[in-house]
Amino acid sequence: QLLWYLLRPNENLKEILKDAKEKIGWKGGVNNDRASQQEPTLSLHVRHGDSCPRSESIRKKRTCEDLHVYMDRAVLPLAAKYGIKAIYLATDDEQVIKDTEKYKQFRWLYQPLQPKDRAPIEWDFINKNNEVDAYGSALQALIDIFLLAEGDVFVGKFTSNIDRISYSLMANRIGGLAPYVSLDSNWCFDWGQKAGNSTLGSFNC
């Protein structure tokens, strides 16, 4: 509840979120309450970009997988169990969006990627050289977080701060724990402490 309070959208962001939902064809209301949802939606985060280098597998004990790994291990079983037909996909990889064509039984919702959304590794370097729209990327991340939080079922990786934040907001919205699958780590909330445990080992939350 504290996180929800700190991150509650202002009026400007509320309008941006409303516009984003209209553009992608989100069915249901635009409020952050379960009653407004007319179509059960699975929230899926497939992060690539700066998660893929080997250094990340060492530092954060995480790796990158293609969409089919998420589908086979979590999305398809959860969709069958809960009658899911719509999936909100948050990703930074155009190939992941293209791969959704293999799963036409679902209605896919996602934001259009910006030309430079494929995140380079060193943010200090790219900011210095103006190689990315920092404001646009940050805004897209915020939109993804809030729309992921409006789903009914969650699939992602709890080595990701975005995933833990989104799931926390989802739990607050529905008043309890939503069905979820984390493909790599159990819950981790001790920020900066080596308290996380993924399939590759322990890491700093």
Image (cartoon, rainbow, N blue to C red):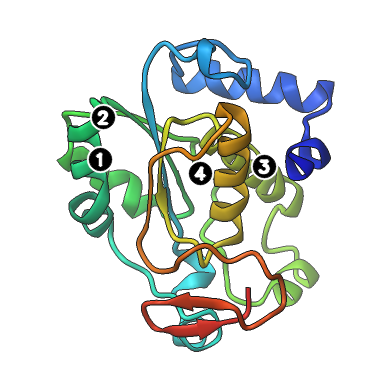
Closest to the observer, 23 or 191 = 191
Comparing labels 2 and 4, the label whose residue is closer to the camera? 2
Q: CA distance from mark 4 to mark 1?
A: 26 Å
Residue 3 image point, x, y percent: 75, 45
Q: CA distance from mark 1 to mark 2?
A: 6 Å
Q: CA distance from mark 3 to mark 2?
A: 27 Å
Q: Which amino acid type is shown beneath numbered disc 2?
A: Tyr
| Residues at discs 3 and 4 in contact (Cβ within 8 Å) | no
Give the class, few, some or many, for how many residues have Cα within 10 Å of label 2's Cα (few <14, many ≥20).
some
* Picture quadrant of residue 19: top right
Does residue 115 lie above or below 121 as drawn?
Answer: above
Q: Residue at the spot x=67%, y=58% of the render?
A: 132
Q: Which amino acid type is shown beneath numbered disc 1?
A: Leu
Q: CA distance from mark 2 to mark 4?
A: 29 Å
Circle 1 SS class: helix
| Residues at discs 3 and 1 in contact (Cβ within 8 Å) | no
Q: Residue at the spot x=36%, y=22% of the render?
A: 40
Residue marked by disc 3: 142
Closest to the observer, 99 or 167 = 167
Residue marked by disc 1: 78
In terms of sequence position, does the residue under pointer 3 or pointer 1 come before the other?
1
Q: Is residue 126 visible?
A: yes
Q: Which label sits on residue 82?
A: 2
Comparing labels 3 and 2, the label whose residue is closer to the camera? 2
| Residues at discs 3 and 2 in contact (Cβ within 8 Å) | no
- Side (left or right) of 19 relative to 88: right
Q: Which label sits on residue 113?
A: 4
Q: Residue at the spot x=60%, y=42% of the render?
A: 145
Q: Which amino acid type is shown beneath numbered disc 3?
A: Leu
Q: Which amino acid type is shown beneath numbered disc 4?
A: Leu
| Residues at discs 1 and 2 in contact (Cβ within 8 Å) | yes
